[in-house]
Amino acid sequence: MGRRRCRATGALPQAIATLSRSLPAGPSPEIFRRAKFDRPEAAPVLWQLLFRVLAPPAADSTWSSLAPEAQAQVVKSALHSLGYPRPVLAQFPEGSRELLLALSWLLARGPLLEQLLDKTRVQLGDQLPQFEALGSLGPPVLHVETEGPMDLRRVQWLMGKLRFRWRHLISSQQEQCTLLGKIHLYTSGCHSHQNLGHLSVTETEMLRDPESSQQLLQALECENTRLEAALEWRCCELVFWQWMDTVLDACPVEGPSVASQPTVLPMISEHGLGELELIEQELQALQEELQEVAESRRAAWEAQVRGLGRGPEWGTTRKALQESVERELAALQGSWEQSSRSDQLHRPHRLVRSKEGAPGPQGLRAAEVIRMLSAQEACLKRMLHQLQSQCQQELARLSGTLPDLIWILAPRH
Amino acid sequence: MLPIDCARRLVSELQGALDSCSERQRQLERSLRVSRRLLRAWEPAGTPAPEPPPEPETKEEDPTPACTPSAQDLKELELLTQALEKAVRVRKGMSKAGQDRAPSLTSTSIATPSGTTASAQPQVSSQTGSHASSTRPTKGIHQAPAPTKDHPECRLISGGVRTQVKMGAQATRHGAGFRDQQIPPSAALQATEAFTLKEMGLWAQLSSTQTSDFTDATRAAKTQFLQKLQMASGWPSHRPSAAEVEVHAQSLRKACALLRLRMQEELSTVPADWMQEYRCLLTLEGLQAIIRQCLHRLQMLRAAVTEQLPGPWLVEKPSQALSPYGSKVDFSWSPEPLFYSSTQELQTLATLKLQVSMLNQQIHLEKVLMAELLPLINTQEPRGPPWLALCRAAYSLLCEGSEHFLTVLQDD
């Protein structure tokens, strides 16, 4: 793909300028140069840049209003959780050379520019809202006020509130779907692309309101500029990496001080190790249960089968069963090994209304996605029920110590 | 009564869940406001308009109070569109010489109806993205199979005019003659189209440069830099980061849950004959083997984290390219379309997505509650009425999803 013609790769400042153009709020080449010599004035800019780069995709406006110290904290914890090997940047606000090294480390290990560009892509189509995974890096948790020992009824009340909010969310979403459906229907035939057929909300808005279309155009223009810069960068980056080698050499050799702090920061917290232990215990418990059951059943089966005669179809039947079970188990194993289909569900899709289903080979059909989601839902429901019955057994065991109690359960529907 | 630290943890967990729910609600409300505003032009406020009926209506459309475009309107607009398309084609034929963008639009859109696959399209758009020769666009236009259908900007302009006409007749906002408003939207749309195509082309090029030849030197330089940094920091070998460990842990957790589920299913069915029993047996033994593998993986993971093992275990999972956000990302140049055929289907889809998310949250909360409440019940010694109240509340929270309450009778 030599279509893109590169500029002269000799100029380092040019390469750095290209990198800056492709980054959000990229600093000037001068900042980079100062950072090599560990000048303090380069530090705040680089902290901000790293914050923009590392803040999770779901970050809303409250993130950018964080104080610089808090931003630095976020950067440090993000780098740490990614496994940044250098002893993490000592204090804020110094250490511009370290910041430069951190940025280069991020650039070197993965397609960072593409990820950043993907994060800020202008989406013209309508999409169903994407939901972030649970337990993702949330905004710094605000201090929860607790007025002394708390009644469990407060927890019950909060749970009820949560359930109500979910119901509200579902009904609002259904209304939004109705409105979207109508807009798609009314604008059918208006779009230039045959297979899309109708306009999305953004596009309709653009037609109605010249101001919003100007904004959109500006955003698209900006994105294109960054994309072009990223492409140019791909041609010129060798010079940058050679320069970064010199930056590393310019660092004072750590020497014996590193050896004196072998566990400067544990890569994984106590909590993480504890979690691994829990999983190991669960797996071992499962293994023991299975072993007991499987052994006894195998013995019973062998005894039973010895009595029967071995017909000609014995071997073939056994083989067929073995193969079928293998396939099933392989499918089961695949279901937790991040299958590509479920990843596909996490990509944003443009909603397109079309009577005859998908006109071409490209694109997903709603019926298929519904099938996948229903299967997922059923599996999750089963998991929840299993947890609940586990609790039930445990509570029954605990309360069984008091014999003169009668527990009347509410009738299950 | 709950002790303070336990209470704090539970409340912060629940509050986090409530906050994320509110955030989604806010975003949804924003989209709802936009959609309602857009629809007001087609359906002036007050009249809840039904979907346009399939059978054609015979009476003439009344421009002022009418709400929904009936099939009749659509037919009329179709004729209007065709007339406009013809006009624009004539106009374009005269002004084609100076324009750089218009040919790029048409040639790319010609490619679209002819059923190109995703791989073919970027090549076309990247060709037009760079300064294509003028012979290509003319060739593209001559290839047009159906003259009325393959002029996108005509469509766009006519689409713009169509909606303007509709709205000009009904909505008061666009009262000022639609001709003045005709130019800006269509010009903006043309520009948007051009930018979008350019963007797609650039994305395609960006993803293709990953495999280009001259980046080998760059890749070597990057690897060298990473190794040098690693060496200089004092940890000679790569240790798995917390993010990586979390990903593996999550997958193992899921594996555990699914394995247990499967085991219970097998154990709960009663086999009818020896073949079914054999099948059940094979499944159980197969599950055992899988568990052995999982345990092995887990032990390797723990060893790599706690000691300084060189990382051969990482090679086991080459497919997981971890991004800072922990998931494998694939950069396609445009979001894939998702086709739905009716509002009902769309609603089902959206509701299912929400329910999956909700169930995930419920399972997480269930685990948190179990971890907090069960030890509490276990350890609280005086088994008096407050302990009973705790049990009762815990039962309803943990076992009934706090939907039902149970009664406890004391038999004295």
Image (cartoon, rainbow, N blue to C red):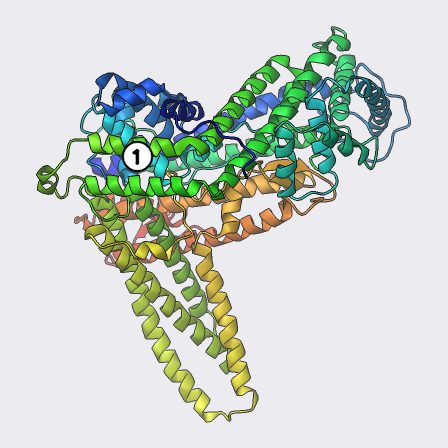
Task: Give how far across and how far down residue B242 sits, in percent.
Answer: 28, 44
Q: Looking at the image, which residue is at 72% across and 37% down? A: B111
Left or right side of A268 for B88: right
Q: Looking at the image, which residue is at 23% across and 33% down? A: A248
Left or right side of A338 for B383: left
Task: Give whichever of A300, A9 is nearer the camera.
Answer: A9
Q: Indicate the chain on which mark 1 is placed.
A: A
| Tally of numbered discs | 1
Where residue A11 sits, quadrant-wise, is top left
Task: Give how far across and how far down residue A23 sits, in percent.
Answer: 41, 26
Is B335 drawn above or below residue B247 in the view shown?
above
Left or right side of B60 for A177: left
Q: Looking at the image, which residue is at 40% across and 20% down? A: A25
Task: Give how far across and how far down residue A86 sits, in percent.
Answer: 22, 37
Image quarter of the C terminus of chain B = bottom left
**Residue at numbered disc 1:** A78
Task: Give whichever of A219, A60 is nearer the camera.
Answer: A219
Task: Give how far across and how far down residue B209 sits, in percent.
Answer: 50, 39
Residue extending farthest right: B58
Amino acid type, residue under disc 1 in the picture: Ala
Is B15 drawn above or below residue B100 in the view shown?
below
Task: Give whichever of B148, B283 is nearer the camera.
Answer: B148
Q: Secondary structure at mark 1?
A: helix
Residue B1 visible, this angle: no
